[in-house]
Every structure is written in C-alpha cells, then in structure tokens.
Image (cartoon, rainbow, N blue to C red):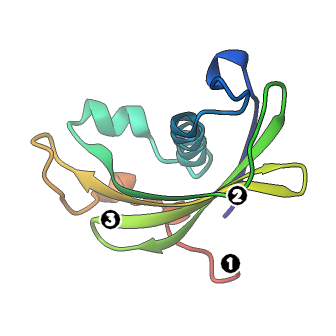
Amino acid sequence: MVCECTLVVRTYECDSYGHVNNANYLHYLEYARYEFLKTVGFDYPGAIKAGYGVYVARVEIDYKKSAVVDDALCIRSWPIKKGVVSGTMAQEIKRGAEVIVEALVTWAFVDSSGQPTRIPKAWDVPGLKPSPSL
C-alpha cells in the first residue's frame, strides 16, 4: 500500500537561500507517516491512550533537489519491512515528476516505559506489512 499526501511549501520553512531547510523535510515525512497510519487503519491516538507508542529509531535521507516557496509537494509512503516489534518505511517527496527527497525510516513499537515491545493484535494491522507487488 502506497499512501500519498500533499502540501505546499510555506515561507517560514525556507532558509536564507530561499529553499526548504533540510530539517523541515523531517516534518514533511512525519506528517506523511501519520497520514499513512490513518490510511491503513492504525489507531495511533488509541495506541497512545493505551500506553504504547511508535518511535522513530533511524532516518536515512537523500536530498536530491531543492524545494522552494509555493512548491506543491507530494509525499509517498509505503512499508518495506515489518517484524514483530519494528519495521521500515520508504518515503519520497516529489515535485511533479521530480524526486526531491528519498528516505528510509525505521520505527519501533514501544510500551509505556519506552521499551520495544511486540505489537499487540489491535495495532498489528495488515497495512503495516509490505505489499508483495512493491
């Protein structure tokens, strides 16, 4: 399953060179991961309320091109690996057909003390698993 969401670059996200500051891409990717979780039926607020969390353990980003104010960006997210406790998601940010950013994000499901734990059935939704066609 590939989830797509869009946003438009805002002025305050840009640096003195006029392009998106590298750190803001992390915000874009986080926003898209949350949209992905909603799309696949993962009840993130419910997991938090039950004392669980999904922590980002690693982010690898390749910056390909710069985005600037008013660029319409499409962020694509899809799972590429899933275990009983953690997984990896691929993400890309595109401006039209141009790839701006490619990222790999490793996440872990954690308990209330922040320790990695097996994903309970209520939150182990099929959409977290990679699709065989991807």
Q: Position of residue 15 (x, y in %)?
A: 63, 25
Classify mark 2: helix, strand or loop.
loop
Classify mark 3: helix, strand or loop.
strand
What's the mark number on residue 64? Answer: 2
Disc 2 + disc 3, Cβ < 8 Å: no
| Residue depicted at 74% across the width and 52% down the height | 65
Query: Which kind of residue does numbered mark 1 sit on?
Result: Leu
Q: Kindly give the residue lying farthest to the right in the view shown.
A: 96
Q: Is residue 61 left or right of residue 84?
A: right
- The label nearer to you, 2 versus 3, is 2
Q: Is residue 20 left or right of residue 112?
A: right
The residue that label 1 is drawn on is 134
Dot 3: few (<14), some (14–19), or many (≥20) neighbours within 10 Å?
Answer: many
Q: Position of residue 66 (x, y in %)?
A: 74, 44
Query: Which kind of residue does numbered mark 3 sit on?
Result: Ser
Disc 3 + disc 1, Cβ < 8 Å: no
Rendered-image quadrant of the N terminus: bottom right
Classify mark 1: helix, strand or loop.
loop
Residue 134 quadrant: bottom right
Instruction: Looking at the picture, tell me which residue is in the foreground, 37 or 33.
Output: 33
Q: Kindly give the residue lying farthest to the front in the view shown.
A: 17
| Residue depicted at 24% across the width and 42% down the height | 52
Mark found first going from the N terminus, 3 or 1: 3
Q: Kindly give the residue lying farthest to the top in the view shown.
A: 12
Instruction: Looking at the picture, tell me which residue is in the foreground, 100 or 7.
Output: 100
Mark found first going from the N terminus, 1 or 2: 2
Relative to 131, say whether 18 is above or below.
Answer: above
The residue that label 3 is drawn on is 86
- Gap between marks 2 and 3, in whole Å? 27 Å
